[in-house]
Amino acid sequence: MLHPYEINQDGHLTIGGLDTVELAKKYGTPLFVYDVNKIRENARAFVRTFKEQNVKAQVAYASKAFSSIAMIQVAKQEGLSLDVVSQGELYTALEAGFPVEKIHMHGNNKSLEEISMAVEHNIGCIVVDNFYEIDLLAHVLKEHGKEMDVLIRVTPGVEAHTHDYILTGNEDSKFGFDLANGQADQALQKLLQIDEIHVKGLHCHIGSQIFETDGFTMAIEKLFSALKSLKERHGFESEVLNVGGGFGIKYIEEDKPLPLEDYVTSLIDTIRNQVKVYDMTFPEIWIEPGRSIVGDAGITLYSVGSIKEIPNVRKYVSIDGGMTDNLRPALYDAKYHAVVANNVNGSEKEEISLAGKCCESGDMLIWDIELPKVDQNDMIAVLSTGAYGYSMSNHYNRFPKAAVVFVEDGKDKLVIKRESFEDMVKNDLSYEEE
Ligand SMILES: Cc1ncc(COP(=O)(O)O)c(C=O)c1O
Ligand SMILES: N[C@@H](CCCC[NH3+])C(=O)O
């Protein structure tokens, strides 16, 4: 069984000590449920490891993994910083009362409106991604008579071992300035000429769902080699080194992520070593974990509907959600584990495939999984759906978005309401004569 789910005396799956069958009855399905203690535990593992090693750091929760007012309030309570990539994520953070000075803004195509909003609210830092954005930012800062700390996002030319669609640190990437072809150097030169901009350091993010530390090590080595040249050429020293997120989590038994502490220790060791090699001052380290903070803290509960058996071929068990609440299997061929929430240890087992409800053959959440035999209205829990589940959910086939519940200290709390049909059509306008 994957952490942190347990079973009660009725054979029901529990989360945070609460019976998932009761939660589904109370709130309906599909339903995302988060164990808030697990979110806190993950966040604390990062923060604690930096503290224990006496390293000045910022752990910025990458809110793209799951952005909601309640989640951002938990990040705030844990003393995290926050990575946002859009006006919508920034707006959510502001609504949650997140301290603006700890917000960092990303994005490969920040609009004038996004940059203006970030500047108007005095956020802590903008991670500059491209030349166009430098001009926009300079313009907005001059117009507002304000200054801004920035990091330069660079692509270090490192191929992390992960899915192509979630690789971000290779040279041929839409993100950031390339180190090898000199664009990062040009960006620094340009930024150093703008009085309103303070370049605090470099940023890189090599990809997501990474299990090994060697990709991070290689990226850091490339950053330091670049920093040596930037120091020689421009007298620039990086106060901050942001090495992004990407720390992998366990979705299925075969996944072997490292303990979160080990990722941090390895980053610190590599940076210590590089500081020695190049005789530089030790920078403040920033990281941006998303998935590793919320991923294994969340599950999705579904009700079983139609069951179709094709003799000698396959049994399709359809549930009341799918690619609308979890796009990852369709998008990345991502693998998940599921349990029958109302009968976790049922002895009569069979192999089924878990089908979503959308009009797409590719809307399959899990192919060929052995589960206790299910019937209509049984309940399925897909595990480790806390990251990029709700946040990538969509309205395909006009399915309303699911509800989200937090559980902590034996209590459950609705933190995102289930969408109604009225919510869904609220921006539609009639094309008929009034
Ligand atoms: C710049 C940046 N930082 C942080 C993250 C968070 O990644 P993860 O959720 O894998 O930790 C991402 C997403 O991959 C990203 O693009
Ligand atoms: N959405 C991706 C990861 C984010 C990639 C962002 N750079 C996933 O579900 O794995």
Image (cartoon, helix red, strand yellow):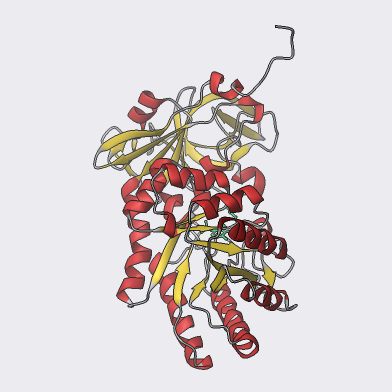
Determine the residue positioned at 72% across, 74% down: 183
From this viewpoint, is residue 350 visible? Answer: yes
Q: Is residue 63 above or below residue 164?
A: above
Instruction: Decide which of 351, 148 is in the foreground and name it.
Output: 148
From this viewpoint, is residue 259 visible? Answer: no
Which quadrant of the figure has residue 340?
Answer: top left
Describe residue 319's horizontal placement relative to residue 50 as left or right: right
Instruction: Decide which of 372, 240 is in the foreground and name it.
Output: 240
Q: Quadrant of ligand 1?
A: bottom right
Marks counted in the figure total: 0
Of the 4 image quadrants, the one containing the C terminus is top right
Determine the residue positioned at 58% across, 66% down: 205
Give how far across and how far down residue 373 sits, in percent.
Answer: 47, 31
Give how far across and how far down residue 287 sits, in percent.
Answer: 47, 66
Q: Residue furthest top?
A: 434
Determine the residue positioned at 57% across, 52% down: 85
Describe residue 176's horizontal placement relative to residue 350 as left or right: right
Determine the residue positioned at 36% across, 39% down: 406
Instruction: Decide which of 355, 162 is in the foreground and name it.
Output: 162
Q: Is residue 123 above or below residue 8?
A: below
Instruction: Decide which of 8, 234 is in the foreground and name it.
Output: 234
Which quadrant of the figure has residue 261?
Answer: bottom left
